[in-house]
Image (cartoon, rainbow, N blue to C red):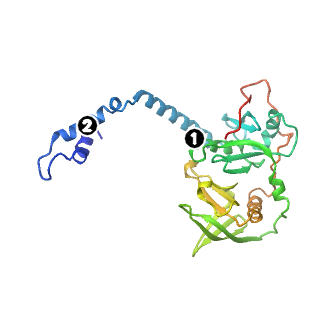
Amino acid sequence: MGSENLGVIFGPTLMSTHEPGSEFNPHEYQLVTTLIDYFPWLFQVNVELEESKGKELKLAEAELRKIMSNIDAPRGSVENSWIVEVFHNQNSVNIKIESGQTLRDVSAEILYRAKLADGDYALHEFLCNGQLQRPVHLSEYLLNTTVTLWEERVQRSWLAIDYNSIKEKLKIFEPPPPDSVEQGSLHMYEAKKKWREVQCKLSQDNFTYSKIKVKTSLNLLNFTWYLGCETNLSPPTQHCFTLRCVSPTRDHKDDIFKVFCAADEAEMWRWLYRINYVKFKEPDYRLVRSKRATLQNPNNRNSFILLDSRLPT
């Protein structure tokens, strides 16, 4: 719609210079038309700069969609690659990864470039200014994990090498018997800082929670678990975990986040053990110098760049 048509529509409403029932005043729509036509000069807007930024954004989005469409392709079948920054203490290392590579495939490179010997280390993903965190399983596609760090919903996120603390938390549990059911009550976040107690049940791959007479079932194979929740949700206790489901369209603005709060730490880890068991069976998080991984040329700075930067704060 042109500026003149917009002026005719909004002029009488915005200006209101004539009495009801009087003739239409052309100055009303002409003034609005002029404001629209000369808005770059009036509001000091650099049209060329804004158009340039818009084109760059569209190109970046197109490249991101191209990468996302090939994440699950077999290794070597596409040429897409990504530079991943991994933090450790006061340093970080940049690692080039390709579609189809799991964390196990690049585990040796991460340890080598971070100058770490074999030890009890794990790669952790931090979201939302570090309020949500989880260890990355060795079987996960690392490119899939990394691309989500660029999304607006999970901004201020990063990957870091840390002690494999989850091993200590999960080793006290025994693998559940076949077809066993885990159930109990948790508090679930709804909206506007409101939490509701719900009855939860975990059976095979399904996590079901009930409130009043409504039951909702989540397929855990589609969800990723995180320790903690965003502090602005005002949880009743500090023993929270978040389930995140990536949108089928791979538009992470539409991701589903379900937040639950347990009465104590033991109860929280009991649920996380069962959720983790559904996803991976074994808590295989320890970074190792796997024979499957091949170190790339350390002199090739296009593959790896050792940085001296601080952890995000």
Question: Alpha-carbon distance for marks 1 and 2?
Answer: 39 Å
Residue 9 appears in the picture as rendered? yes
Q: Is 64 placed above or below 23 here? A: above
Q: Secondary structure at mark 2?
A: helix
Q: Amino acid at mark 1?
A: Arg
Q: How many marks?
A: 2
Q: Secondary structure at mark 1?
A: helix
Query: Which label sits on residue 201?
Result: none
Left or right, 189 with reference to 91: left
Left or right, 6 with reference to 54: left
Task: Count neighbours of disc 1 (C-alpha within 10 A) and say few if under 14, some if 14 to 19, many if 20 or more.
Answer: some
Q: Which of marks 2 and 1 precedes in the sequence? A: 2
Left or right, 222 with reference to 117: left
Q: Nearer the viewer, residue 299 or 260?
A: 260
The image quadrant that residue 71 belongs to is: top right
Residue 72 appears in the picture as rendered? no
Q: x and y percent of residue 157 in the render?
A: 65, 43
Query: Which label sits on residue 33?
Result: 2
Farthest bottom residue in view: 213
Q: x and y percent of residue 275 in the render?
A: 73, 61
Q: x and y percent of residue 121 in the render?
A: 82, 45
Q: Quadrant of the C terminus?
A: top right
Farthest left residue in view: 22
Q: Amino acid at mark 2?
A: Thr
Q: Nearer the viewer, residue 34 or 143?
A: 34
Which residue is the site of mark 1?
Answer: 65
